[in-house]
Amino acid sequence: MIFNVIAIAVSAVALITSTYIALQHQALQKTANFAPVYMQLLMQFQTMEFHDHYRYVTTKLTAEHDPKLGISGLPDDARRAVYDIAYLFQGYGIMHILRIVDDQIIPAMQLRAFAVWEAIEPYVERERELQGLSGLYMLRGLEELAKDASSKIGAAGTGGAGATNFQPKRAPRQGHW
C-alpha cells in the first residue's frame, strides 16, 4: 500500500514538472518565432535615414505642416518620414501588446515612442477622421506604447510636457490596434 502512495506521489511530481517545462518551452518558442521580426525592426535603428526621419518628425513636422492635413495630406517627404517612424514604433507596440517582447526590451523604445506619438497624434487623429475609422484604427499599437511610456515616465518623475497626463482619445478595445 505504501508503495502505491509513493508511486502516485512520484507520478504527480513528474506530471507537474512536465507541465511546467512544457509551458516554459511554449513561451520560449513563441518569443523565438518573432525574433527575426524584432531583429529586422532593430536594424532600422542603425540607418541614418531612420535618425533623420525621427529628428524631422519630432522637431520640425508640426512647425512646417498643419495637423488638419492629416497624414495623407502631407507632402511626400513629410508623409514618408511619418510613416517610416510611426510604423516602426507601431511594430514594437504590437509586439508589446501581444507580449512577444518582454518589458526589459521595451524601455529602450519608450521615450522615443512617446516623443513620436506626441508629435504625430494630431495628424493621426485627423487621418482617423478623414478615413472614418472606428474600432480597428490606425497606429493603435504606437498609441498604446506611448501611453505605457507616459505612465512609466510620469511614475519616474522624469517626464517632460504632458508626460504624466497622456490619455488616448479613444477608449482602448481589447485585441485591436
Image: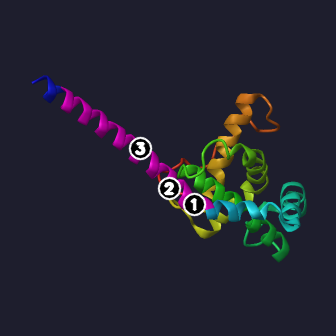
Give yes or no for contact between labels 2 and 1 (Cβ–Cβ under 8 Å): yes
Q: Which residues are magenta?
A: 6-35
C-alpha gap between disc 2 and disc 1:
7 Å
Give yes or no for contact between labels 1 and 3 (Cβ–Cβ under 8 Å): no
Instruction: Give how far across and how far down residue 15 sits, in percent.
Output: 29, 40
Residue position marked by numbered label 1 in the rendering: 34
Q: Residue furthest top?
A: 2
Instruction: Give how far across and how far down residue 81 sits, in percent.
Output: 81, 67
Q: Main secondary structure of the magenta part?
A: helix
Q: Residue furthest front?
A: 3
Q: Secondary structure at mark 1?
A: helix
Quadrant in the rendering for residue 94: bottom right
Q: On screen, 159 above or below 81?
A: above
Q: Residue at x 44, y 52 (%)?
A: 26
Instruction: Give how far across and how far down residue 74 sits, in percent.
Output: 80, 71
C-alpha gap between disc 1 and disc 3:
20 Å
In this view of the protein, which residue sits in the foreground, 125 or 91? 91
Of labels 1 and 3, earlier in sequence is 3
Q: What type is the residue that disc 3 sits on?
A: Ile
Q: What type is the residue that disc 1 sits on?
A: Phe
Q: Residue at x 85, y 74 (%)?
A: 77
Q: Is residue 151 magenta?
A: no
Residue position marked by numbered label 2 in the rendering: 30
Point out the image quarter for the C terminus.
bottom right
Instruction: Give how far across and how far down residue 9 sits, in percent.
Output: 23, 29
For this view, does 173 lie left or right of residue 94? left
Query: Is residue 130 at least partly visible in the picture?
Result: yes
Q: Of tags 2 and 3, which is closer to the observer?
A: 3
In this view of the protein, which residue sits in the foreground, 11 or 66? 11
Q: Secondary structure at mark 3?
A: helix
Residue position marked by numbered label 3 in the rendering: 21
